[in-house]
Image: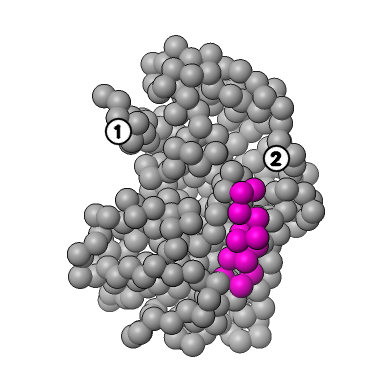
Amino acid sequence: MSSRVLITGGAGFIGSHLCDRFIAEGNEVVCMDNFVTGSPDNIAHLIGNPKFKFIQYNVTDFIYVEGKIDAVLHFASPASPIDYLKLPIQTLKVGSLGTHKALGFAKAKGARFLLASTSEVYGDPLMHPQREEYWGNVNPIGVRGVYDEAKRFSEAMTMAYHRYHSLDTRIVRIFNTFGPRMRLDDGRVLPAFMKQALLGEDLTAFGDGTQTRSFCYVDDLVDGIVRLLRSNHTEPVNIGNPDEITILQFAEEIVKLTGSKSNISFMPLPEDDPKVRQPDITKARQILGWEPKVPRIEGLKKTIGYFREKLGLK
């Protein structure tokens, strides 16, 4: 049976892929975005589709959409360090006020609510890999605290609505994700490395390059999110690829895949930058029957093709 869903932040990197997935399944999508970090380009191919409706709107204001809504997926938020360091107040507001408005809207519509949380709730973790039961190691007054604490607050608010109002809620903790529609200037390591490699510039690794990340291709992530939404599990679930790699190894991989002659240079490690990041996906495997299927190399090749086109390269 088809459903009608509201996706806040639907013109963002992950949000736009979710729009595609729901429409491909024959559902109706209401996409809400104010284009602070999202892009009209990400949803341009959906404009004119009778199953797609776009509303340009700031979700920190009262949310209203006519008609039935079966699910609300709250993805509105700056999500890269360069964005939330530039937009600290907006980041805190969309995580607090925006989540409150989205939850209130879901309650009014009797809709299921899914919160896009993040591995950043674990901060610079003292547990490795990170399990959902871990409470995290976050500096609340550090420069990254505006994002980390906004997401931690949004999780607390979501669980409060679940417990107090009996709202049907889900929480996904998203780990490093990549794929087409990432912004070239997003500031995260993957688009930065790819842009530098494709333009023949030095790849700038922070610290000594020994810090680790785990990269999940966007199609796998979207599948995990949809499975979680349709499950009965109300506690947070990690969705990410546990295949861990150091930043230096990752830089070397990008150079090789792009055929670049770029060298690797090193910059000081940013404040509170996590040293390790790897999801424990035991719950996702057991509860959702989910695990990533796209190998990192395969996903990187698809993403390089997208970035070549964006940069006007052959």
Q: At x 43% / y 43%, what residue is drawn?
A: 182
The reply, left or right, for residue 296 in relation to residue 93 is left
**Amino acid at the residue labelled 2:** Pro
Q: CA distance from mark 1 to mark 2?
A: 32 Å
Residue 267 versus residue 226 in the image, above or below: above
Query: Residue beneath label 1, please?
Result: 309
In the rendered view of the protein, which quadrant contains the C terminus? top left
* Dot 1 and dot 2 residues touching (CB under 8 Å): no
Q: Which is more N-terminal, label 2 or label 1?
A: 2
Magenta stretch containing residue 3, yes or no? no
Give the dominant element type of the magenta stretch: helix, strand or loop.
helix
Q: Secondary structure at mark 2?
A: loop
Query: Residue beneath label 2, please?
Result: 274
Residue 161: horizontal and vertical position, in percent? 62, 80
The reply, left or right, for residue 77 in relation to residue 68 is right
Residue 24: horizontal and vertical position, in percent? 25, 60
Q: Nearer the viewer, residue 190 or 295?
A: 190
- Disc marking residue 199: none
Q: Which residues are magenta?
A: 85-98
